[in-house]
Amino acid sequence: MDADEILLDVEERMEKAIDVLRHALAGIRTGRANPGLVDSLRVEVYGSQSMLKQLASVGVPEPTQIVIRPFDPGTLREIERAIQASGLGLTPMNDGRVIRISVPPLSTEVRRKLVARIKELTEEAKVAIRNVRRDGNKMADQAEKDKSLSEDECSRLKEEIQELTRRYEARAGELAKVKEAEVMED
C-alpha cells in the first residue's frame, strides 16, 4: 500500500465512526418528537426482523407527537409491540390505522442520564477513531519495512494520520455538544 491508499483507508474508516455516532445520537430522545427516535427500531414481522422505516412512514405532525402509518395495516400490532419493548419509555396508541406516540417532556434526572449516554457514545466513537489511527500507523510502518515508503514519507504519513485523528475527534465532540444542548433545552 502506498501513502495515499493508507490515508484514504484511514479517512474512510474514521468517517464511518462518525456516521455510527451520528446515527446513535439521532436515536436519543430530546424534549421534541423526532422520527429518528423510532425509525431504526427492529420489528418482528413475516418471520424476520425489519426496520420500522421499511414497514411504515414516520411523521411528526406536532412537536410532541410521532405518527406511524404502516404500509400494511396488518403490521400495526407488531410495530406497537416493538415500540413498547424498545425501552424508549414511549407509549404507542393504536387507532386501527395509525400509531400515535406522545413524547412526554423530559425530567431533569432523565436529561442528565441522556447527557451521560451522549458522552459514552462520543467516547466510544473517539476510541474507534484512535483504533483506526493505530491501524493506519501500523500500515505505514509495514510499508516502510516493505521498502514501499521511505522513513521521511512514513513519518509524514503518520503526521497526516494524526491530523485526521484530531479533526475527526473534534467532529465527534461537536456532534455531542449539539445533541447535549438539544437535550438540556426546555
Image (tube, helix red, strand yellow):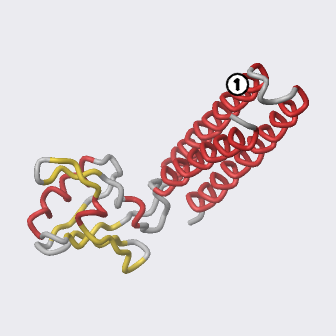
Asked if residue 179 lies left or right of residue 143, the reply is left
Indicate the quadrant containing the N terminus: top left, top right, bottom left or bottom right. Answer: top right
Q: Position of residue 123 (x, y in %)?
A: 62, 37
Indicate the quadrant containing the C terminus: top left, top right, bottom left or bottom right. Answer: bottom right
Q: Position of residue 154 (x, y in %)?
A: 83, 30
- Examine the image and state in which quarter residue 105 appears: bottom left
Residue at image x 39%, y 63%?
104
Q: Is residue 6 above or below residue 70?
A: above
Mark 1: few/some/many CA within 10 Å (<14, 14-19, 20+): few
**64 or 69: which is nearer to us?**
69
Marks counted in the figure total 1
Residue at image x 69%, y 32%?
136
Residue at image x 24%, y 62%?
92
Asked if residue 114 lies left or right of residue 58, the reply is right
Q: Residue furthest bottom?
A: 61
Q: What residue did someone put label 1 on?
A: 138
